[in-house]
Amino acid sequence: MVTEREEIRGLGHSVKRVEDDRFIRGAGNYVDDVVLPGMLHMAILRSPYAHATLNGIDASRAQALPGVVAVVTGELMAQHNLAWMPTLSYDTQAVLATDKVRFQGQEVAAVIAETAYIAKDALELIDVDYDPLEPIVTPQRALESDAPVIRTDKEEQKDNHIYHWETGDKEATDKAFEVADKVVSLDTFYPRCHPSPLETCGCVADVSPATGQATIYMTSQAPHAHRTVFALVAGLPEEKIRIISPDIGGGFGNKVPVYPGYVIATAASLLIGRPVKWIEDRTENLISTGFARDFHMHGELALKSDGTMTGLRVSLLADEGAFHADAQPSKFKIGLFGIVSGSYDLPTCHVSADGAYTNKAPGGVAYRCSFRVTEASYMIERLVQNAAYELDRDPADLRKQNFIEKDQFPYESATGFVYDSGDYQAAMDLALEKIGYDQLREEQKQQRDDGKLWGVGLASFTEIVGAGPHKDYDLLGLRMNDGAELRIHPTGKAILKISVQTQGQGHETTFAQIVAGELGIQPEDIKVMHGDTDNTPYGLGTYASRSTPVSGAATAMVARRVREKARQIAAHLLEVSEADIEYDEGVFSVKGAPDKAKTIQEVAFAAYTDLLEGMEAGLEGVYYYDPPNLTFPFGTYAVAVEVDPETGVWEVKRMVAVDDCGVRINPMIVEGQIHGGLTEGYGIAAMQLITFDESGNCIGSNFVDYLLPTAWETPKFELGETVTPSPHHPIGAKGVGESATVGSPAAYVNAVIDALRPLGVTNVDMPLTSAKVWAAIQEAKATASS
Ligand code: MCN
Ligand code: CUN
C-alpha cells in the first residue's frame, strides 16, 4: 500500500541549482584551491614577438634566484620527446619553442619555484636571443607567394596553406546560380573573439615518484578525452593517469584543447618528483589560449524573382593561427559549417574553404558554438536580410516563404545533415507577436520620416548539436559516445556518475532530474558525480551542447535499465508476474489492483535484503549511448534598435528570443543558458575583438581592450518558447547551451543594418562599435552626395 506521495520534480520543473549552495558560499573547489604537500609553482615565459628565430636561451640568472627549483626549456622537453604535441586537427603544436616562435604569447620557457611570486619574478631573468622575422597577421598575406613560411618545422609544408575543403554539390549549385533570377552576395568577416571564462586555465600535476601514478587536477571540459590524449602524448599507461576536473568557473569552449602548460607542468612534476601548480593570468588566457572564429566569408544566395531560394554558395578563408588546433570532428575540416543553409529549404548548397597559418595564437575552438555553426548561422541570416532588401521584401516574409516546413522533417539538407524535427514558422510567429513586429515596422516608417535611425533585425537560426553518431563523428579517432552509471542505494537514494563535465550548466541538478523522471526518486536524493576519470564512465565531455543529447540520453537509458530490474524485484515482492506490474512515478503496482504496490525505495531496499533465490543483488547499471543522429534546436530572435546618427552609438530597445530545444528538463536553467548566450552574442556583435597590429602584437590582451558586456550595457531579454521534441532522443530533449550565442549576433547586426538601410549601408563587420557604425554612416553620406 502506497500513501500519498509528493510530486516528483523530474522533467519540466525549475528545481533550484544544487551546486549554487557551495558557489554562493564561496565554498566551490576550483583548481587553484587545490593545495598539495610539497607543491611547487610554475610560471611560463612567453614570446614578445609574433615571429622570430630562437637562437638560444640563457637561464643561468633565473636558475640562481633563491627559490627557483628548475627552468624548463624546449631543449629539455625535446630530450624527453615532449617539445611538440599533437593537436585535435592532426597537426603538431610546440609545447616549448625550440626553433622559432610563431605567435606573440607562445610558450618559450617555464620556471618552477617554491612560490608563484618567485616563479614570476624569475621569468624576467631569463635571457632569450631572438631574431625577428616578418610577422604574418592576415590569412590573405599568408597565402601570397612571397610570404615567409611559418611552419618551417614541417618538412612537407612549403607555404602557409593548411587545407582546402569542400562540401555540397558544386555542379548542381553552379547550375542553380546560372538560371537564378537574382543573386545576392555578402562579404563579411566574423572576427576573432575569445571565450574568456571567469576562471582562467590551469592545473596541478602530481606525479608520484614512488608509484608512477599521475594525478592531474585541471580545468578540463573533457577529462576522459584529455586522459587518453595524455596517455598517447606522454606514453604513460592510461590506468596510471587520473584527471580530476573540480569545479570549473566557466569554459565556453576555452577548456577543450590540451594546452602546453598542462604538458609542461606534468613533465616538470615527473622530473622533479613534486606536485606542480600552474595557473594562467588573464593576459595569458587572452593571448595564448583557444580563440574562436576568424573566418573571412563570401556568400551568395540564388533566388527566383518570387523570392524562392534556389541555391547557396559560400567560400571562406580561415585564419588558423600558427598551429592548426581546431576542435572538430575529424570528418569535418571546418566543423559543422556545412549547416550553412540554416532554416531554409535550399535545394543546392556548396561550401569551399581554405585554411591558412598566420602568426597568431592557435585555437579555432568554437566559442559557445557547435564546431563553427556560429559562423554559418551568421552568414545565412545576414545574407537573407540583404536578399530581402534587394527583392524589396520584408525580411520576415522572405524567411517564412523559404522555411523548411513542419511536415518536411526529418529533412535532409543539401550538405547531408538530417534535421530531426522543427517548426520554424511557429517560433517566428511567436517572436513577431511578442515584439509587435507589424507595429514596429509602422513606427519605423514614422521615425525614418523624422530622420531617426530605427531598425528591426531577425535571425531564425538552426543549431546542430549532440556530436555525434559514431558513423561520422570522432575526435582523433575516439568515438563521441558518452556513458552514465547509476546506483540505487538500499535506502532508495542514488548516485549518478556521468562522463560530461559541468562548467556552470547545472548538470548536478538537471541530470538528477532526468533520473527523477525515469525512476521517481526526488532529485535531491540523487548525487551527480563527474570530473574524475577514475570514478566516472568514459565519454568525450562537454562542448557543442552535447551533454543533454548524448550523456543525458545515456542517463535516461541507464535509469530505464535499472527500472527493468526494479520491476522484476517488485514482481517478486508483490508475488505476481512481471507482466502484471505497472509503473508510475516511482511506484510499481499490480495491474487492476493499484493498492498492491511498492515504491522504488522499498524495491531498492529489497534489492539488498530480500531477493528471489538466484536473483543478483544490487540495483545499478551502466549505459553507453551512441546517438543515432544529432539534435537540431532552433529559434527566432528579434531585436529592435535605435542608432544615433551623430555618434554611431546604438541601443537595443527590445530583444525577444524564442527558443525551441525540445523538451526542457529544467526551464529555469534553460532560460539561464539563453540569457548567458544572448549576453555573449551581444558582446560579440557590439564590442569584442581580438586583433593584431602589423607587428603581430595582440590587441585585446586585457579587459580594458577586450570588452565584456556588464549589466549596464546588456539588453533586457524577453524570452518565449515552443516545444518540438527530438524524435530520437529518449526524453525528446535537444541541447540548448549554445543556441543563443549562435543565433543572436546576426539578429543584433541585422537590426543595426536595418536602421542604416535608408543610407544604403549593407554591411558593417562585427564588432559594431559606435566608431565603426559612425564611419559607415559618414561613408554612406559621402557616397550619396558625390
Ligand atoms: N537543458 C535542459 N533542457 C534541455 C536542454 C538542456 O534543461 N532541453 C539543461 C541541461 O541539462 C544542462 C544545460 O541546460 O544543465 C545545458 O545543456 P546542454 O544544452 O546539453 O549543453 P551542455 O551541458 O553540453 O553545455 C555545453 C554548452 C557549451 S558547448 C558552452 S560553450 C557553454 C554552455 O553550454 N559553456 C557554458 N553554457 C555555459 N554555461 C555556463 N554557465 N558556463 C559555461 O562555460
Ligand atoms: Cu563550442 S564552445 Mo562549447 O562547445 O564548449
Image (cartoon, rainbow, N blue to C red):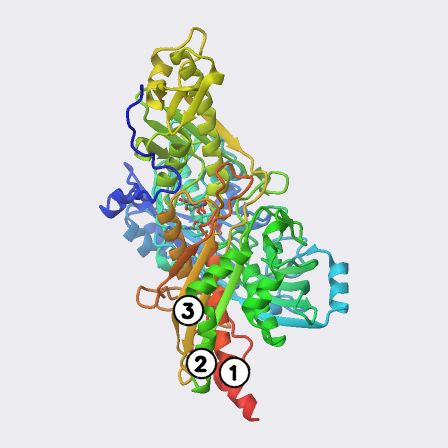
As displayed, is residue 340 above or below residue 736?
below
The foreground one among 211 and 502 is 502
Quarter of the figure with the C terminus: bottom right
Tag 1: Cα neighbours inside 10 Å, few (<14), some, or many (≥20)? few
Contact between marks 1 and 2 (CB within 8 A): the answer is yes
Tag 2: Cα neighbours inside 10 Å, few (<14), some, or many (≥20)? many
Query: Given this view, does label 2 or label 3 mark the residue nearer the observer?
Result: 2
Q: CA distance from mark 1 to mark 2?
A: 8 Å
**Residue 528 can be seen, yes or no:** yes
Dot 2 amino acid type: Leu
Q: On the image, numbered disc 3 is attached to which residue?
A: 687
565 lies left or right of 632: left
Which circle's residue, 1 or 2, is located before the other in the chain? Answer: 2
Quarter of the figure with the N terminus: top left
Residue 278: image location, x then y, percent: 36, 47
The foreground one among 225 and 666 is 666
Q: Which mark is residue 453?
A: 2
Q: Which mark is residue 758?
A: 1
